[in-house]
Every structure is written in C-alpha cells, then in structure tokens.
Image (tube, coloured by chain):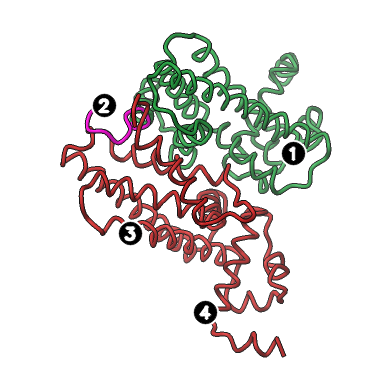
Chain colours: A red, B green
Amino acid sequence: MSRTKKDDKPAGWRKAEIIEAAAQCFMERGYHATTVDDVATRLNATKGRIYHHYATKTDLFFDVHRTGMDRLFSAIRPVHDRGGPARERLVAMLLAHARAMLEHHTYETVVAQGVQVHRFDQTTEGQRQTMRDLIATRDTLEQLFKSTLEDAIAEGTLAARDVSIAVKVLLGGLQWSIFWYRPQPGETEADRVALAEKMVAPLVAGLRAAD
Amino acid sequence: MSRTKKDDKPAGWRKAEIIEAAAQCFMERGYHATTVDDVATRLNATKGRIYHHYATKTDLFFDVHRTGMDRLFSAIRPVHDRGGPARERLVAMLLAHARAMLEHHTYETVVAQGVQVHRFDQTTEGQRQTMRDLIATRDTLEQLFKSTLEDAIAEGTLAARDVSIAVKVLLGGLQWSIFWYRPQPGETEADRVALAEKMVAPLVAGLRAAD
C-alpha cells in the first residue's frame, strides 16, 4: 500500500529524494567511500531505483554538486540583482552567502569535495563536460561578487584592490564553515542568521578600532 | 652503489622522504584512493620500506598531517612571540599564515583532508588518540590568533567582536587557498609573498573606502 503510494509520486520528487540521501552519504563518508548501496540503504530502497535515474555514482555526485551550486545561486542572485549602492549590496550578498552555507551545509560540503573528484577520478567525456559546466557556474557566482566589488571601488566606497583574490578570500572565509560548522539539534533560522552575521562582521569591519 | 648510499642515510631522513612522497599522493588522489603501493611507487621503493616505519596507511597519513601542522606552527609562533602592538602582530601572523599555506600547499591540503578521515574512518584507539592530539594542536594554533585578537581589542586597536568566529573566518579565508592555489612552475618566494599580501589585504582593510 505505502509502496503504491510511493510509486504515485512524480518522478522529480523521487529524484529529489535520491539526491538528498546521496548528499547525506557523501558528506558523512566522502565521495570515494560512498557506494550506491549506501545511498539505497539510506533510502530503504533498491539499488535499481537509483540506477533507474543515475548510470553511475559519479553522475549522482554531480547532481548533488549541481543542487548545492543552485542553492547558493538562488540565495545570492536576487540580492545581487536588487541594485542600490554597491558596498551595501556586497555586505548583503556576503550575508546571503553565509546563510546559504549554513542552511545547505550538507550540499556545500559535497560541492567542496567536487574539486577533489575532479582531481582524482578517471571520468568519461560526458562527466568532464558536466564538471566544466559546474566550474563555469562557480565562476559565474564569483563574478557576481567581483563585479559588485568593482562597482564599490568605482563608487568610491571601497579601496582599490586585487578583486579576484579578494573575492576568493572573502568567500573562502565563509565557505570554510564546512569544516567547523555542524547543524545543532533545535537550531532555528534565527540562530543561523545570528551566526552568519558574526561570520560576515570581521570581513566587513577588517582589523579596525571601530566597526 | 646508489642503493648503499641510500641505506647510509640516517633513519630520520628516510622517514622524511616517505612523508614527502605520501603528502604528494594524498594531495593528488585523496586519502581513500591512495594506497601504500602508490607511495612506494612514487619513492621507487618497496612497500616493505614503508611498512618498516608505518603499520598502516592511516598512521602514515597522520604523520603527514602532523608535519603540516608543525610547519604552520613554525611559521606563526615566532611572529606571535615577537610581542609588540597586538594589531600589528595580528597582521604579521596572518601574513605568515598565508605564506605558510602557499609554501606548504601540499601538506596543508592533506591537513584539511584530516577532518574527513576523522569523520569517515573506523580507527583504532591509538589512532583516535593521535587524531585528538592533532585537533588539540589545531586548537592551540587558533588560540594564538584568538589571544592576539583579544589583546588588540583590549589595547583599543580592534573593535570588540566574537573572537572565536572571527578567527575561524579569517584563517578560513587564507586556508581556502588549498582549493584555488596551485604552485606555478618557476614561482619564487617573492611571488608567494606578493600573493600572500594580496590575500591578507582584504581581511585587514575590510570593506572600506581607504586601506
């Protein structure tokens, strides 16, 4: 009966379930140690159900990676597109990025593993193309920050600097949270906002006597 | 003849060779995909030579991890101990940290993998103790920065803030370089210093109109 119900779910929903379970597995055990069996076990499903959607573990990994990138984009792009003074926009974008890193911690941890998969694995041409697309997406995300930094320099609210390195360091400072942050039981949205503000504060203030 | 020469080397030197080769392997392929055979092949040696020093791959990994932490410490502690105004010391410590991250890129990439090994692997009690020691070392390193931030706040040259989160974000901004930095052929010490300065600049200046 419950099985029949499950089969009634739209295909997209079932795929989202697989991606969610895979994200958990990859985060906990890493790309290499995770098997399709692990993901199936977590879903209480058969391997066949996963192979129906994904030819290999690597393809499944890429979909988790893509989901993680999409969630960052969805958090940051609207703030970027809102317009207004560039420096204020930049602060709001950093805050949105920090919040997204915390809220989607599982996925963003897997995104960081993606660099390693790229380095380590023998992949097919199709998979290499997917990897290039994912890297292009990451570059586009960085570009949103770079152009906003350039706008702030042009409007005179930010000192001139190496914009490319600055973006890598600012985003890296927030992204490093994959190594030290762990969602706490009972943690609320307000808790994550408060933590995100503490993370962004030193980047905005710099090493100054007054914020 | 060259083999005899090699055998004449002090035991410590041979161990350092193994650690160096292992660091390269772990960086390139990751902890899970690297085998003791890979390390032996890179050394043009037998597995036996490695097992003479290390009972398992995990123990070898820990020595690479420890070496990476030691190198960070050796770079930062003297700057910390030099004394003087806390804010200037903090800037110098960040610069030393950035330089060490670039110079010891291979080892520091493996240090970051250490978090994952801790998460993923079934380890022995002895290995868990080693892991606790390594985590304690990392905490001590962070403590050098925390106490210097607190000194700068006390001397009035730094606005009060959450020191613990600030240190994680500042160091994370520099440590994220393991994901984007790759040593370039012909790169000099001066090149690395120039890059380290560009990395530290946005952390020191914050999002301000003038540096």
Query: The residue tagged with tag 4: helix, strand or loop?
Result: helix
- Residue depicted at 75% across the width and 31% down the height: B130
Which residue carries the number 4 mark? Answer: A12
Q: Secondary structure at mark 2?
A: loop
Q: Position of residue A79 (x, y in %)?
A: 31, 57
Amino acid under disc 4:
Gly
Circle 2 is placed at which residue position?
A: B211
**A70 sits left or right of A55 in the view:** left
Mark 2–mark 1 CB contact (< 8 Å): no
**Element assignment for label 1:** helix
Of label 2 and label 1, which has the lower sequence position? 1
Q: Which residue is mark 3?
A: A77
Nearer the camera: disc 4 or disc 1: 4
Compared to A5, does B72 lie above or below?
A: above
> On the rendered image, what quadrant is the N terminus of chain B found in?
top right
Residue located at (51% from left, 36% from top): B165
Residue at 60% x, 28% y: name it.
Answer: B68
Q: Which residues are magenta?
A: B202-211
What's the distance in space between the residues labelled 4 and 3, CA to CA?
24 Å
Q: Which three-letter amino acid code belongs to the residue tagged 2?
A: Asp
Inter-mark Cα distance, 2 to 1: 47 Å
Mark 1 sits on what residue?
B57
